[in-house]
Image (tube, helix red, strand yellow):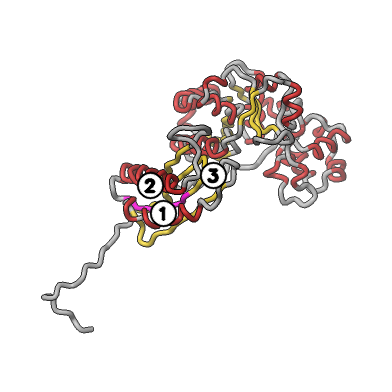
């Protein structure tokens, strides 16, 4: 079997970087993202300037303000971050057939080290640099790229590249794989990650990454680094971690057989609008009539994209209408059509009714989205009435 070649693409401080792209005045400021109107709310993301002041994810807002009085606090915009992640995934899907999303700003890319690559003399370093340039050119995002033979090592390499490499690139040579993970914190191992632990029974949500309960357990056992876990015999791991002992034993030695699972992403078309706080034509609103008007504009934009995408030969079998209130409550409704539709005019009335049903609170709306899905090229056959002069055949 040909060996795997896996890149881990990592955009550091993903939400923070996106906020700086749309608010240039934040580029040199210490700021953090947190839910508004509560000193007990936890910090969700921090800029590098805020991190240098000692502020970290999970810290209460009140404590963060005491440590850095000049700290700027912004409400998160999850729909904006999710939209950027989807755009990043769509771009990656156009470049490689096998990829897997690993969270916001994180994507695994897989390929085989085949003869074609060797004949072009493309080294892993060149390939990583190529990905960096494409992401920077397409999205104005700086990324760290790690390259290795499996997912765990490529993830560790990308984090190492971000912290220690000036050009944000890191390649793990195959002869050094077994030793590369040794100095990393034990929390990097997949059994201690939320997506791996969920459903294991003993280690449930309290053992997630950045969890105090998980950290306390590892500290009590003096398992601070991967090297600490690697030194333990399997029978000790089975006593301490009965459900994940074998996994820990393998991962601590750099052995990771998890494949990059191809993401089966259905083709969709979206049109969205962000409404800002304050006064102005694009400000948050709780006016149902205005929301319906925005919805109609987004419908027109989405169907224009549909026509451009399929040259008028593609139809939508479902339309999802979504909105987010300013207090981060999300509401959406999907409308199915049989036969599928290709014109906005044919769905306006039904969409207006659904917008009224979705907007049932007095809170202002800050985000509206229309998504066309279940795209098909099936032609629509119309049944025309028979002409009176056409004789009807008896059956």
Residue shown at 65%/35% (left/top)? 36
Residue shown at 46%/48% (left/top)? 288
Q: Which residue is mark 3?
A: 324
Please tell me whether residue 153 is drawn above or below residue 199 in the rendered image.
above
Q: Quick one: SS at disc 1?
A: helix
Q: Are marks 2 and 3 in contact (CB under 8 Å)?
A: no
Residue shown at 67%/44% (left/top)? 195
Which stretch appears magenta? 314-321
Of 304 and 328, which appears nearest the observer?
328
Please tell me whether residue 212 is drawn above or below residue 143 in the rendered image.
below
Q: Which residue is mark 1?
A: 351
| Disc 1 residue crowd, few under 14, some 14–19, many 20+, Cα 10 Å | many
Q: Quick one: SS at disc 2?
A: helix
Main secondary-structure element of the magenta-colored stretch: strand
Q: Which residue is mark 2?
A: 296
| Residue 129 within the magenta-colored segment of the rendering | no
């Amino acid at each position: 079997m040909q060996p795997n070649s896996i890149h881990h693409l990592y955009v550091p401080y993903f939400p923070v970087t996106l906020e700086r792209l749309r608010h240039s005045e934040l580029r040199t400021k210490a700021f953090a993202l947190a839910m508004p109107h509560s000193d007990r709310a936890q910090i969700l993301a921090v800029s590098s300037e805020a991190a240098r002041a000692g502020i970290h994810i999970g810290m209460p807002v009140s404590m963060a303000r005491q440590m850095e009085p000049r700290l700027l606090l912004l409400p998160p915009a999850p729909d904006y971050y999710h939209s950027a992640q989807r755009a990043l995934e769509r771009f990656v899907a156009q470049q490689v057939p096998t990829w897997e999303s690993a969270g916001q700003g994180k994507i695994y890319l897989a390929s085989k080290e085949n003869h074609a690559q060797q004949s072009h003399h493309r080294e892993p370093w060149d390939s990583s640099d190529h990905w960096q340039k494409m992401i920077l050119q397409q999205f104005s995002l700086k990324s760290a790229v790690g390259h290795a033979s499996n997912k765990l090592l490529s993830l560790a390499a990308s984090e190492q590249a971000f912290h220690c490499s000036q050009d944000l690139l890191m390649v793990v040579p195959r002869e050094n794989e077994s030793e590369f993970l040794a100095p990393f914190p034990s929390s990097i191992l997949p059994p201690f990650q939320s997506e791996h632990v969920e459903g294991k029974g003993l280690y449930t949500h309290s053992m997630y990454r950045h969890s105090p309960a998980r950290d306390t357990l590892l500290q009590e056992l003096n398992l601070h680094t991967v090297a600490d876990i690697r030194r333990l015999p399997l029978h000790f791991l089975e006593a301490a971690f009965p459900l994940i002992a074998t996994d820990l034993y393998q991962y601590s030695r750099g052995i990771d057989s998890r494949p990059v699972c191809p993401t089966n992403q259905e083709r969709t078309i979206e049109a969205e609008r962000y409404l800002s706080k304050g006064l102005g034509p694009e400000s948050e609103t709780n006016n149902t009539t205005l929301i319906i008007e925005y919805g109609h504009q987004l419908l027109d934009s989405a169907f224009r994209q549909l026509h451009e995408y399929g040259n008028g030969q593609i139809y939508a079998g479902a339309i999802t209408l979504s909105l987010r209130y300013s207090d981060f409550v999300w509401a959406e409704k999907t409308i199915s059509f049989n036969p599928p539709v290709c014109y906005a005019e044919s769905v306006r009335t039904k969409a207006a009714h659904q917008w009224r049903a979705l907007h049932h609170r007095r809170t202002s709306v800050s985000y509206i989205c229309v998504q066309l899905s279940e795209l098909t090229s099936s032609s629509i056959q119309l049944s025309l009435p028979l002409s009176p002069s056409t004789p009807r055949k008896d059956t």
